[in-house]
Amino acid sequence: MVFEGITRKQAFLTHLAISMAIFFVLLYFIIFKWFPSYYFHIDGGYRGIATIFFVDVVLGPGLTLLVFKPGKPSLKFDMSVIVILQIVALSWGIKSIYSERPALTVFYDGKFSCMNFSEVSEFNLKRLLIKDEKPPLLAVLPRPNTHKEYQDMMLEAFRHGSAEIYVFSEKLLPMDVVGTTQVMNYRLDVANNFTGHEADIEKYRKIWSEYLEKNPDAPQKYLYYPLSCRYNKVLAVFDPESSEIVDYVPVYTERAESRIELGFTPEELEEFEQYKKMQNNSD
């Protein structure tokens, strides 16, 4: 018999050892492949580990400890059910985490936003690749040049019940020289733009001061923009030389402001001129 001479403790420890081996393999992929760098901390890495730990390390061995009884007539059937249940749960967990791994971070209108693979399934990511780069990628959605175009994009996104970065994916640019220039058109006075409750702002000021003390040359080398991901909102540290987000500061601010003002279409200018004439005539 398969389980002859095996005690409950031995069965539990064996199942636990196998489950832990699988867990550490998946742990490697979560930390270094699926949620690399800062994404691990702010876009679901911890949640992914918790999910895998529960369905792999807790569920299977826990059921074995609960069900296993030497000499039990239905033991073989019971253990088969436990193994199948664990495989199904683990498969679901892996599929869920894999589909939610970060795929793209888009800069638009003064802030970065994270997007996972399930959200960009219809995007053409290949055209955003630079050389041998692999996801997660950085991209830019250029801001329109005029007030009318800006408002039209907002209304179109509102009609879709989404944000502009999802609706206008065909306009995305890779984070190359052109894309980086788009980002560099924005500047943020970090110290005066923290957002949140009064207690949060006070905490952010302290964190920001400590960051500047440890990195006195950083403000001259890097640019700073709010970064919003699924599980956290932080301040991205953007290096314009490498066109990458190299770090983050655990504070959150308002959007950065563009140094280039929106223009007016000929129609808007004509309307404005007519408005001025009406004002002059009324005077």
Image (tube, rainbow, N blue to C red):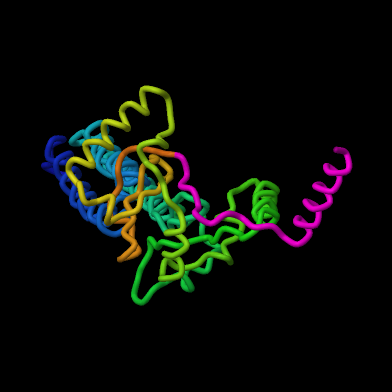
Residue at horizontal 38 percent and vertical 60 percent from the top: 136
Return the residue found at the far bottom: 131
Seen from the viewer's position, the closer of residues 61 and 92 is 92
Relative placement, left or right, of 93 versus 26 is: right
Residue at horizontal 46 percent and vertical 58 percent from the top: 185
Seen from the viewer's position, the closer of residues 198 and 138 is 198
Residue at horizontal 76 percent and vertical 62 percent from the top: 266
Locate residue 12, reporting x and y percent: 17, 39
Residue 1 visible in the displayed image:
no
Q: Is residue 168 above or below residue 96?
A: below
Total of numbered circles in the picture? Answer: 0
Q: Is residue 42 above or below residue 240?
A: above
Relative placement, left or right, of 163 versus 135 is: right
Return the residue found at the far right: 281
Residue 198 visible in the displayed image:
yes
Quadrant where the image shows the C terminus: top right
Locate residue 180, reporting x and y percent: 41, 64
Query: Magenta stretch containing residue 257, yes or no?
Result: yes
Question: Which residues fall within the magenta stretch?
Answer: 254-283
Query: Magenta stretch containing residue 65, yes or no?
Result: no
Relative placement, left or right, of 50 versus 154 is: left
Q: Is residue 6 above or below residue 137?
A: above
Seen from the viewer's position, the closer of residues 74 and 47 is 47
Return the residue found at the far front: 283
Locate residue 138, reporting x and y percent: 41, 61
Residue at horizontal 69 percent and vertical 49 percent from the top: 155
Locate residue 42, reporting x and y percent: 34, 44
